[in-house]
Each structure stands twice: as structure tokens, then as C-alpha cells.
């Protein structure tokens, strides 16, 4: 069963303007499936994966021979295993002077960016892929979330609005394609196998870990802190590793596409801003598994429910932008000062700041807007704001702000 990916249209568009298109993302989010779907519509496109050791060895030791054997248009899966190919791909695309020649996938996002930027600068269109968004799972159009684009009259959610139990069931299972198409598959079984594959293939390629159990404890400690400000010293203390090791391991989670770090707002007029980013897991199912939640109802009633609800909302918003090929790294931030005043998310769009609060409540009321006025002191123009919550419909709170159902994002 193939679930239509919102990124398909953007991928096809990039292939018309760049000789190389690269899709980066964590393991099993659907990169290979997406490119095979593209390939079905273009029979001339060949496919080769570097997961096979013999092909990987040829690509590393004889990159020119490899590219002679596999002619474009060509899909090369798991390109991070043979970065030696990239300079030779550059030579070939410069000689051919045409678009849509190579389609690359990689399971290590920023780990690859240096190689790509050095070898293929100006020649590659890059897409970041995450697990399925709710819109993709439900077969709806996946669009970037922006408060001013939402009007109450446009807000027609499902006939029976989500209950909080519905949402935590979605949070518990996450958005991995395998979990979406096989409703009988338990998260315990799937994510147990997923983590084993991740350790064996990705982690051993990126860093030398003497104690895999300690790394698993590290990633589990990080998952238990999703939706919170990053405190590496605290995590390192729990795992018994030094700060340098904790920082290196965190960079692996980010480069693998498993974790997103939301930076703080850094305007010059803010003197007491907190400098640490907030940590979010990009698949809530994985975060639940790693933090040892095996029952969505228990999670819903726990002290961690608010952080998981926020993680779900933030990850859905990020996916909506990434699916349209928008670089999310400079698009979002959050605000929190030393007085504890916080705004969960600020979206930066066309010189405007759009404040967003995320509340598990069905009717958080105007009190949810109390920190939005902080932004009035900033140099940027302030756009409309939103409170994403369990409301069954969009409800204006004042002239510029509204409640928005979590189902809409």
C-alpha cells in the first residue's frame, strides 16, 4: 500500500531545474519508496542501492567505473555510504548540462551536507523528509501552517472532532509508514527492530561507540525530555558521559533526522533571552517507545502528556513546511526569557513574526495569549497568532488571534 507523499510534486519540480535532487531523512521514513514511485512514471530511470556491500565497495573504490556501469537518469539509494561518488557526479552533470540526471537519498542529513555543498554546489536541489504527517496519512493536502491563512469559515474538520484519546493514540503510534499501513503492528515490535537497525547501520558509520547500551540510554534520556529546553549537562550526568561526548551524540541524532533543535529568538533588543534550543523528536511514536510508554492512555494521563502533545504539534508543523521543500532551519524559533515568559513557537515569514501557543486544553481562553504582547518590543512586524489546542473548531479570541484545532495542522 502506497501512501501519497506531499513531497512528490516538489521533487518532480526540482528535477526540472537541477541535474541532481537529493532526499535526506531518517531511516524508514519512505525515501526509497518515494523515489521508486517517481521511477514508475519514468521507465528510463535506473535504480541502485548502496546497501549492498559489493556495490558499495565498487562505488567507493571505483566511482568512475560505477557511474559508467549505471548511466543516468539514475536513483542512487543511501549515497552516504560512498561520498566518493559525488565529485564524479559533478563532472558528469557539468558535461551533460541537463537536469534530472541523478536522484540521491541519504539517511544522514547534515552529515552529508558538507560533501554535497563542496561537490555539488548550485547543482543539487535538497529535500528533507520526515515520517508521514497526519495530512498524508488521511489523504489530505499537506500545507505549511500559518495563522493568518486560517479563517473560521474555512475550518471544516472531520464530522466527529478528535477526542484527546484519539490524539494520544496518534501520538503513540507516530507517523512511520510501516506503522501507518499495518495497524496490527505494535510500536514495541516495530521500534525495537528500528533501533537495532539504526545502531548497526547509521551509528557505527558516524561514530565509534564502545558501549551501545550507554548510547541507547542517552537517546532514551533525550526522548524523555522532548518538548523541553536542551540541557546536555543534565542528560550527560544521567548517562555518565562528559559534555563533549553528549554534544557529539546529540549531533548524530540531529544529522540522522530523528531530532530537531528549535532555536531561541535572538533579536538584538532582547537582553535576557534564554540561549538554549528546545529539543523535539520528529516522530512521537519513537519518542514514546524510547521513553518507555507502552500505553497511550497512561501517557495521556501522565505528567509528560503536555510535552508529547507539544512535540506532536511542532513536528506536524515542521513536516508541513518540509513537504513543500521549505528549509525549516531558519523558519522557526521560540521565545523564553529569564522571567519564565515563553511562546512555544514563532514562525518567521516575509519579515513577520507569527506567535503560536500549544495547549492540551479544549478551551484555554485568552490567558493563552498573555505572553504574545512581549513581541511588541521587537523590531519585526507581528502577524496573527494562534493557540493550537483541542478545540473542535476555529474560534477568534481577539482581532488578531484565534484558537485552532490540532486536527488542522
Image (cartoon, rainbow, N blue to C red):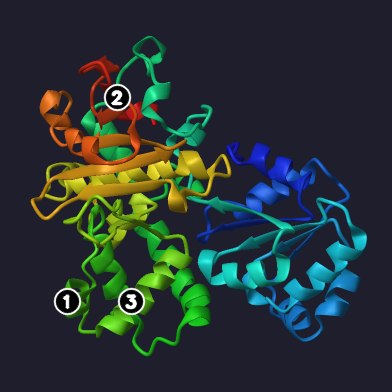
Q: Quadrant of the C terminus?
A: top left
Nearer-N-terminus badge (2/1): 1
Foreground label between 2 and 1: 2
**Within-10-Å neighbours for mark 1: few <14, some 14–19, many 20+:** few
* Disc 1 from disc 3: Cα separation: 14 Å
Residue extending farthest to the bottom is: 210
Q: Is residue 28 left or right of residue 15?
A: left
Foreground label between 1 and 3: 3
Q: Is residue 227 left or right of residue 331?
A: left
Nearer-N-terminus badge (3/2): 3
Q: Which mark is residue 48?
A: none
* Disc 3 from disc 2: Cα separation: 36 Å
Q: Is residue 19 above or below residue 177?
A: below
Reading the image, the residue beneath label 2 is: 404
Residue 360 makes an appearance in the image: no
Residue at 85% x, 56% y: name it: 73
Reading the image, the residue beneath label 3 is: 247
Residue at 40% x, 86% y: name it: 209
- Tags 1 and 3 touching, CB below 8 Å: no
Q: Is residue 254 left or right of residue 243?
A: right
Nearer-N-terminus badge (1/3): 1
Reading the image, the residue beneath label 1 is: 238
Q: Is residue 135 above or below residue 401?
A: below
**Within-10-Å neighbours for mark 2: few <14, some 14–19, many 20+:** many
* Nearer to me, 291 or 221: 221
Please state the horizontal and vertical placement of residue 81, each as a whole percent of the image. 64, 75
Residue at 19% x, 75% y: name it: 233
Amino acid at each position: 500500500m502506497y501512501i501519497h507523499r506531499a513531497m512528490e510534486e516538489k521533487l518532480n519540480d526540482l528535477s526540472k531545474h537541477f541535474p541532481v535532487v537529493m532526499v535526506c531523512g531518517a531511516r524508514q521514513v519512505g525515501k526509497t519508496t518515494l523515489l521508486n514511485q517517481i521511477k514508475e512514471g519514468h521507465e528510463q530511470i535506473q535504480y541502485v542501492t548502496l546497501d549492498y556491500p559489493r556495490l558499495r565497495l565498487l562505488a567507493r573504490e571505483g566511482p568512475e567505473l560505477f557511474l559508467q556501469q549505471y548511466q543516468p537518469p539514475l536513483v542512487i539509494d543511501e549515497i552516504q555510504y560512498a561520498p566518493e561518488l559525488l565529485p564524479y557526479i559533478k563532472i558528469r552533470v557539468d558535461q551533460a548540462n541537463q537536469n534530472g540526471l541523478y536522484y540521491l537519498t541519504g539517511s544522514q542529513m547534515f552529515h552529508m551536507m558538507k560533501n554535497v555543498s563542496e561537490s555539488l554546489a548550485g547543482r543539487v536541489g535538497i529535500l528533507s523528509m520526515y515520517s508521514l504527517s497526519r495530512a498524508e496519512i488521511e489523504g489530505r493536502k499537506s500545507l505549511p501552517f500559518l495563522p493568518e491563512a486560517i479563517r473560521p469559515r474555512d475550518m471544516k474538520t472531520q464530522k466527529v472532532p478528535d477526542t484527546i484519546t484519539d490524539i494520544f493514540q496518534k501520538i503513540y503510534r507516530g507517523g512511520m509508514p510501516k506503522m501507518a499501513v499495518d495497524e496490527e503492528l505494535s510500536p514495541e515490535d516495530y521500534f525495537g527492530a528500528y533501533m537495532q537497525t539504526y545502531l548497526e547501520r547509521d551509528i557505527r558509520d558516524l561514530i565509534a561507540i564502545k558501549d551501545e547500551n550507554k548510547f541507547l540510554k542517552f537517546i532514551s534520556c533525550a526522548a524523555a525530555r522532548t518538548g523541553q529546553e536542551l540541557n546536555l549537562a543534565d542528560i550527560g550526568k544521567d548517562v555518565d558521559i562528559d559534555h563533549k561526548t553528549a554534544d557529539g551524540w546529540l549531533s548524530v541524532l540531529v544529522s540522522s533526522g530523528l531530532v530537531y533543535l528549535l532555536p531561541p529568538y535572538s533579536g538584538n533588543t532582547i537582553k535576557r533571552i534564554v540561549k538554549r534550543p528546545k529539543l523535539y523528536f520528529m516522530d512521537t511514536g519513537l519518542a514514546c517507545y524510547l521513553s518507555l510508554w507502552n500505553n497511550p492512555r497512561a501517557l495521556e494521563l501522565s505528567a509528560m502528556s503536555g510535552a508529547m502533545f507539544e512535540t506532536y504539534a511542532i513536528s506536524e508543523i515542521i513536516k508541513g513546511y518540509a513537504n513543500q521543500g521549505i528549509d525549516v532551519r531558519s523558519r522557526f524559533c521560540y521565545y523564553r526569557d529569564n522571567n519564565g515568559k515563553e511562546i512555544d513557537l514563532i514562525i518567521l515569514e516575509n519579515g513577520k513574526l507569527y506567535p503560536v501557543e500549544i495547549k492540551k486544553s479544549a478551551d484555554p481562553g485568552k490567558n493563552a495569549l498573555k505572553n504574545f504582547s512581549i513581541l511588541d518590543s521587537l523590531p519585526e512586524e507581528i502577524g496573527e497568532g494562534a493557540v493550537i489546542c483541542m478545540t473542535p473548531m476555529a474560534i477568534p479570541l481577539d482581532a488578531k488571534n484565534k484558537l485552532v484545532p490540532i486536527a488542522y495542522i
